[in-house]
Amino acid sequence: MSLSQRNLALLLIAPGLALVAALFLYPLCFSLISAFTGPEGGFSLQAFGKAWELYSGDVVFTVVIVLASCFFTGLAAIIIAGTLTLGENRYIVGTLKALYRWPLFIPFIVAAQCMRTFLAKNGLMNNIFVSMGLMEPLQAVSFLDWRGIIATFVWKQTPFVALLLAGALAALDRATLEAGRNLGASRMRVLVELALPQVMPQLLVALVLSFVTMLSVLSVPMMVAGSQPTMLTVDMAFRINAYGDYATANALGVITYLISAGAAIIYLKRGMAKEGTP
Amino acid sequence: MIRAVSGLRMVLAAFALAAFAFFLIGPLVNLALWSVAERWYTPYKLPVVYGTRYWEQVFRPTGDAMASLATSVWIAVLTVLVALALSIPAGYALARLKLPARASFMVLFLLPQAFPSVAIYINVARVFYSLGINGTVFAVVLVHAAHGLVYSVWIAAAAFAAVDKDLELAARNIGASPLKAFFSVTLPLAAPGIIASGIFVFLESLDEFTGTFFVGVPQVTTLPLLLYNAAMGGNYQVASITALILLVPSVLFMLFIERFLRADVLAKVGA
Amino acid sequence: MRILTLACSLAALIVASPLSAQTLNVASAGDQNMVDYVKDYLGPMFEKANPGVKVVSVGTGPGDSGSQKIYEKLDAQKGAATTDFDVVVIHQKAAGQMVKEGLLNKYTANVETAKLATGDNAKNSLGTDVSGFVIPMFQSQTALAYNADMVKTPPATFAELADWARKNPKQFGYNGIKGGMSGVSFVAGWVYAFGGDADKLMKGPYDAATKTSWDKAFADLKEFNKNAVITPGNAGTLDMLNRGEIAIGPVWVDMFYSWQADGKLPPNMKLKLVSPGMPGQPMYYAVPEKSAQKKLAEAFIALATSPQVQADGIVKKFNWYPGIDAKNLEGKLDKAAWDKLFTDVTPAELAANGKPFPIAPYFNDILEGYEKKVAN
């Protein structure tokens, strides 16, 4: 071969990278420059100071919301995927299979729209509970705050994570799982102790993708919850719309980026570990 | 006794499933109800007056819902083609060839998903204006492709990784050139996963708002542009109907995705 | 595969190449009903009067963020020969900024109807002199919407409202300052009421030291917020009023009427403009400096601001307050339509309690003060 494998690989990946570089990395540079430029020009961390002074609470809020959403998404996805793989009742597995993917392709803005009227104090959900006699009207509470944001994210992202996880579980060696069952282990134990450790990488990948997506969504926090506290995307939009202050908005963008970098590093570490082993 | 226990478990499982279905389907039912609600206010728990007034409004002759839908689908199809043209070689390289710093390349494709997009698209628009391609379908397609590339590259890499190497070797052994082996063995075997990746790209493109606004408007208008105004302004009826229209291609694909997303491919996504 | 892609893209490029020269692109920052107003009402009317012309209407989202998108788009096109938009419908804040940065064309001398709009807001936009660059499309006003079944005697002043909210915890809701302008307007009204010299905030001159005098008002507002519900957005406030979750909330009058027409508010909802007053603002028609269709754009705006269109389209169809002076609408409108506009808020109340927003630097100080002292 005239071309080394390594060069061939770089050649093949180059067009995709070029697109990302031209339409993402290059424009990103402007954002970075603006974030690090002071009002009189020159290098400055002033925008970051302002971002921190005004929005430190929202940074924490955002991280907590996204982590909690990832946690519940992961949990729900494990239950769904576990039932799909290890469930013994044909009807339950069949129904679940037919149902769980519905929200997969619903845009975030539509999900937010649905949830805003569904989770409200006198929204459809509470009204149904009241009508069914499960709840007194006075007990109704509104979920249109951090709980609403988490619920919407989990609702929207679970199918995606469950889909990838169910695929990974289905590809496992059935014999080991059967052996576990034959030795008297409950399905729960087989799932937690035998199956899950083997599919952790896939779960991690799906959650990293979800994490990053949730961080950059504007419509859900904007439409589902009141603005105090709120997520960083809302603050960014507000900074631009109310003050035309791109520097602070971009500084917030950089902070968001650092948070997603945290997720990416987890992913990278796993990748390195794998490359290290022959 | 054992029977009673398993019966109880059945009931519990059925109950859990019902609760799950409620939380899953409830918001969607809510959406459907709003699309036909002409009057709905407190203290009524369900719409007071039902009707198709808003459906007629969305599909009125001067409204451009259908034209926007057609543009949306056309852009999405082109986006898939561009993304696949880029991600098939990239995916193959990531899956099969020795690539230095492979994981960092994977992360690089993840980046456009991660950064809140408004700031980026303003600058992209500047570049596109200077090139004179703003307001063209081509420009919108490029922006959508960059955004959706993470799905297509990650899933295509998984699809190639799932193809049995021995089959490729066998083809080479009977004298096929590397290129021929790729096109006659590897690509067909990886095709289901690649199609699946295309579906994700398709749907990402179908939902995209911000990029389309900055590089497409006013010459190119897509359905999410209509949806965005209605939803942000709280016009629930119109937003619900637009969302339902947008759901049609999504649901169609969801029904087909099963055929393409095989377990062994899914198992390798992002790996 | 790649050749196919390239071919497709090229085909797309050709298909989507610039439309015919006689296209008038109108961009509206605002709700769907404003976009539809151009698309269904003004557009066809203009096309009929000018055969061969096609009006394209796009919306950029409600509130200041919609105007900001128009600004960003025009700004990104600074280097281009012509802009994408020929007529823009924008808020006050963006109008001031665009005039300052030279993005707008001074066109009103060419439009006869400009003389019909003599109000202060046709010349002054949050402290920026915009005379010659804009004609108001309509006036809007914020007011408190309340459910007359739940609130028998609505509060008439901000002080009474604060009192009412203390006695009825979680029955008043507004959307903070990040979720849209109705909440911003409430906060501005609060500062007008409790922050000292309101006139100075509306007229200037700007004095950076003034903001320190609002500390007490902000501290009280923080206290007030404990009994208030923070709603998700302008629409969120109306939404909660719809479901009876709150009894009073600040809303835009035009949104209020369109929600009522859409059956999304109980029939017994009413409006109250509390004293000393809440802000309102016009939407402006403006023409970008580099529009390729300046003549057409001017003709379009002349039509849109003509007394008949203002009467039929703005007042009768949407219950918006007209953009041109009200006296010009006399005889164009039946009394019932005119009276409907003032069912809850009388012209006298509107004159006394309808305020402009503070001038831009004070406006920013109020928002940032709120972020620092109330929300944080």
Image (cartoon, helix red, strand yellow):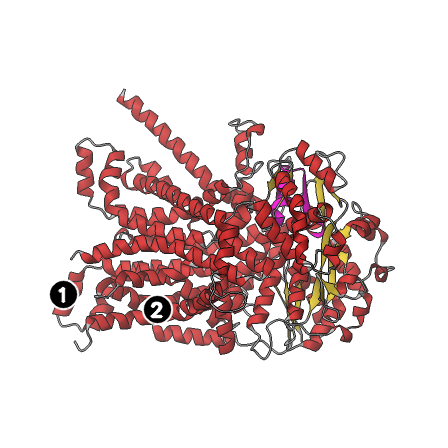
Q: Is residue A249 above or below residue A94?
A: below
For disc 2, the neighbor class at 10 Å (few under 14, some 14 to 19, many from 20) is: many
Q: Along the horizontal axis of the image, is C332 left or right of B219?
A: right
For disc 1, the neighbor class at 10 Å (few under 14, some 14 to 19, many from 20) is: few
Residue C107's tag is none
Q: Along the horizontal axis of the image, is C313 left or right of B83?
A: right
Residue pointed to by mark 1 = B170
> Is there a contact, CB below 8 Å, between mark 1 and mark 2?
no
Q: Position of residue A256 (x, y in %)?
A: 44, 55
Specify whether residue B207 is painted magenta: no
Q: Is residue C310 above or below residue B11?
A: below
Residue that extends furthest to the right in the rendered view of this protein: C331
* Res. C33 visible in picture: no
Q: Position of residue A106 (x, y in %)?
A: 46, 51
Amino acid type, residue under disc 1 in the picture: Ala
Q: Position of residue C146 (x, y in %)?
A: 71, 40
SS of the residue under disc 1: helix
Give the quadrant of residue C203.
Answer: bottom right
- The answer for which chain carries disc 1 is B
| Residue closest to the eye, C125 or A165 | C125
Residue that extends furthest to the top in the rendered view of this protein: B1
Residue at 71% across, 74% down: C106
Q: Is residue C333 above or below residue C1?
A: above
Residue that extends furthest to the left in the rendered view of this protein: B173
Residue pointed to by mark 2 = A16
Q: CA distance from mark 1 to mark 2?
A: 30 Å
Looking at the rendering, the stretch of residues picked out in magenta corresponds to C233-254
